[in-house]
Image (spheres, rainbow, N blue to C red):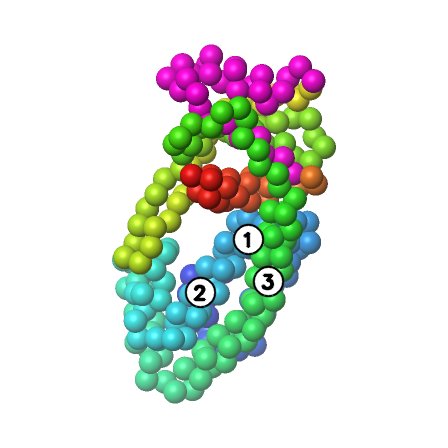
């Protein structure tokens, strides 16, 4: 996937037409992936760049806060040097502001398309507990079936809680375990018994059967959406 540099809009030649070409080329590829219902990492990358532009637009002087997620100290120093060269140049700043305004306008519809795809995929997911769920279901397994495909993918999961100054968030870590072919004999209930025999340290693990009504790209769409949906489902139930 083509990607924009972190500081693409202030690096190199600060020329609106040139930056417009770079942006449209990037968005064209993003939309090609979205046309195939391939969400990740494209949607995450797009939202990252959109937020960077918003932060920069709100406060151009606080560059370290403008790029909080990816910048190393070396990146920050490079951005500051670049900024110092243009901060006193009114024409350059006007050009940058034009680039940012145009980029935000063009990125927003692509983000909305990505979110619509995400919502559609999520609406096609069914999550069902298998057997008795323990009181603390934050560790366990889930079986993922992609549309009409008979092969199920088994993952071990661990839901974590992390906090910032304002709120608590839940994340999920997964490990791929195995696959199995679903049949009248090889059911999610039979799978749970196998998992219990396989790992006796979890005598009654939480096990969930996650199935989509439609087949989607597994790694780029279905699995990321299933992970987030499972976190919401378990958090609500718990």
**Residue beneath label 3, please?**
112
Q: Which label belongs to residue 42?
A: 1
Asked whether 62 falls inside the magenta stretch, the response is: no
Residue 112, percent across and down? 59, 62
Residue at the spot 52% in from the left edge and 59% down from the top edge:
46
Q: Which label belongs to residue 123?
A: none
Please tell me whether mark 2 sits on a helix, a strand or a loop.
Answer: helix
Residue 149, percent across and down? 70, 30
Total marks shown come to: 3
Residue 232, percent across and down? 48, 44
Residue 58, percent across and down? 38, 75
Query: Which is nearer the eye, 22 or 157?
Result: 157
Asked whether 188 falls inside the magenta stretch, the response is: yes
Binning the other alpha carbons within 10 Å of mark 1 as few (below 14), some (14 to 19) or many (20 upward) gives many
Residue 142 higher or lower than 106, as above or below: above
Task: From the image, state whether disc 2 or disc 3 is nearer to you.
Answer: 3
C-alpha separation, residue under disc 2 versus residue under disc 3:
14 Å
- Tell me which corner region of the image, top left, top right, bottom left or bottom right, holds residue 70: bottom left
Residue at the spot 27% in from the left edge and 57% down from the top edge:
165
**Would residue 51 be visible to someone looking at this image?**
yes
Q: Is residue 30 left or right of residue 75?
A: right
Magenta residues, start to end: 184-212
Residue at the spot 35% in from the left edge and 66% down from the top edge:
66
Position of the C terminus, as image quadrant, is top left
Query: Which is nearer the eye, 113 or 71?
Result: 113
Q: Is residue 166 left or right of residue 230?
A: left
């Amino acid at each position: 996937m083509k990607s924009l540099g972190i500081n693409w809009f202030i690096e190199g030649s600060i020329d609106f037409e040139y930056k417009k070409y770079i942006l449209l080329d990037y968005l064209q590829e993003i939309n090609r992936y979205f046309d195939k219902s391939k969400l990740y990492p494209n949607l995450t990358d797009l939202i990252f760049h959109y937020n960077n532009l918003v932060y920069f637009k709100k406060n151009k002087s606080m560059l370290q806060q403008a790029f909080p997620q990816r910048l190393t100290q070396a990146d920050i120093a490079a951005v500051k040097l670049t900024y110092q060269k243009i901060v006193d140049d009114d024409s350059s700043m006007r050009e940058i502001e034009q680039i940012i305004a145009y980029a935000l306008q063009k990125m927003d519809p692509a983000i909305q398309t990505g979110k619509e795809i995400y919502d559609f995929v999520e609406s096609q997911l069914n999550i069902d507990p298998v057997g008795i769920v323990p009181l603390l279901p934050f560790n366990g397994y889930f079986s993922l079936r992609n549309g009409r495909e008979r092969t199920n993918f088994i993952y071990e999961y661990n839901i974590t809680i992390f906090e910032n100054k304002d709120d608590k968030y839940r994340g999920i870590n997964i490990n791929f375990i195995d696959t199995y072919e679903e049949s009248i004999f090889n059911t999610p209930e039979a799978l749970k018994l196998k998992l219990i025999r396989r790992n006796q340290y979890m005598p009654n693990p939480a096990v969930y059967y996650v199935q989509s009504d439609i087949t989607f790209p597994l790694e780029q769409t279905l699995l990321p959406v299933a992970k987030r949906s499972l976190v919401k489902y378990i958090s609500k139930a718990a």
